[in-house]
Amino acid sequence: MNTRTPARRTLRTTGAGAAALLALSACSSSSGDTTTGTSGPPELSGTVTVFAAASLKEGFEELGARFERRHPGTEVTFNFGGSDSLAAGIVNGAPADVFAAASPRTMAVVTDRDGTAGPPVTFVRNQLQIATLPGNPHRISSLEDLTGPDLKVVLCDEEVPCGAAARKALDAAGLELEPVSYEQDVKGALTKVELKEADAAVVYRTDVRAAGAKVEGVDFPESADAVNEYPIALLEDAPHARAGKAFIALVRSAEGRKVLTGAGFLEP
């Protein structure tokens, strides 16, 4: 009988301790933050609005989904497009939390108006490829091949980063190219090839990869002279600044870098 007494005493002590802990917990909950307790920062909530270059679409949508799973109560909405148009929208008052541009030049449109909460940071780089029809029926192997008289080629408008990069690559090759159309963003240029409305387009390698079997990519050496840096920044009047900062942190993390390099981007 006596050998079991200590065990019963231990159980009684444990029960009393648990009751005390429950009482303390109840007091703490009633006097502190009912959502997160008193020891940690408040949970993120609200809609994070991200203006991002069109070429970031696939990678950012994946990161947005991960962000929402990690922070229940948040939503990430994207406005993808040509960086110049996005920058113009921001300086004209379009509400957004984060801007991710495809070139420092287009980011400067916003920073020159004191539109960011801090200095932009480069998070990835991107390089050009030639997108051709599947199977590359015209046997395109270089930028010079795009100057053929019977070839329908599409470029991005030179005001947007992919167009400015293409112009730089053509200048490096000493070539003049008259496209059948200039598109307002890289997705528009790629779509012309996907729909067989053009034989080729000069776009980013990330967009060629995202298109899968719809197009074929051709590397060319002059693309090394036209690598674009992508800066990201929290905007000065961000409606949801805390959540915007957290999204930028995810983009710049090892996890974010893995997602983006998996989509074909280069390390910053």
Image (tube, helix red, strand yellow):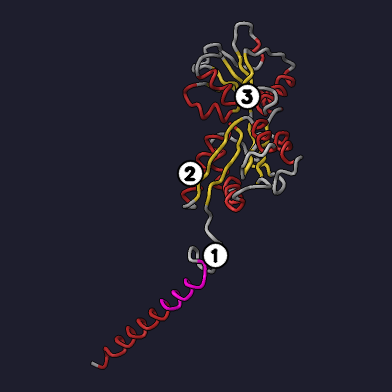
Q: Which residue is mark 2?
A: 65
Q: Earlier in the sequence, mark 1 or mark 3?
A: 1
Is residue 32 found inside the magenta-colored segment of the image? yes
Looking at the rendered structure, the secondary structure element under dot 3 is loop
Residue 85 sits in which quadrant? top right
Residue 52 at x, y percent in the picture? 60, 37
Q: Main secondary structure of the magenta part?
A: helix
Residue 124 at x, y percent in the picture? 63, 39
Q: Nearer the viewer, mark 2 or mark 3?
A: 3
Q: Quadrant of the C terminus?
A: top right
Q: Which residue is mark 3?
A: 184
Looking at the rendered structure, the secondary structure element under dot 1 is loop
Is residue 104 found inside the magenta-colored segment of the image? no
Task: Work out which residue is located at the far right of the displayed protein and give it.
Answer: 112
Q: Which residue is mark 1?
A: 40
Q: Quadrant of the N terminus?
A: bottom left
Which segment did they paint magenta? 22-33
Asked whether residue 249 appears in the rendered view, the answer is no
**Crowd band around label 3 with a 10 angstrom C-alpha radius: few (<14), some (14–19), many (20+):** many
Q: CA distance from mark 1 to mark 3?
A: 45 Å
Task: Work out which residue is located at the far left of the displayed protein and give it.
Answer: 1
In the depicted structure, whether residue 46 falls above or below residue 211 = below
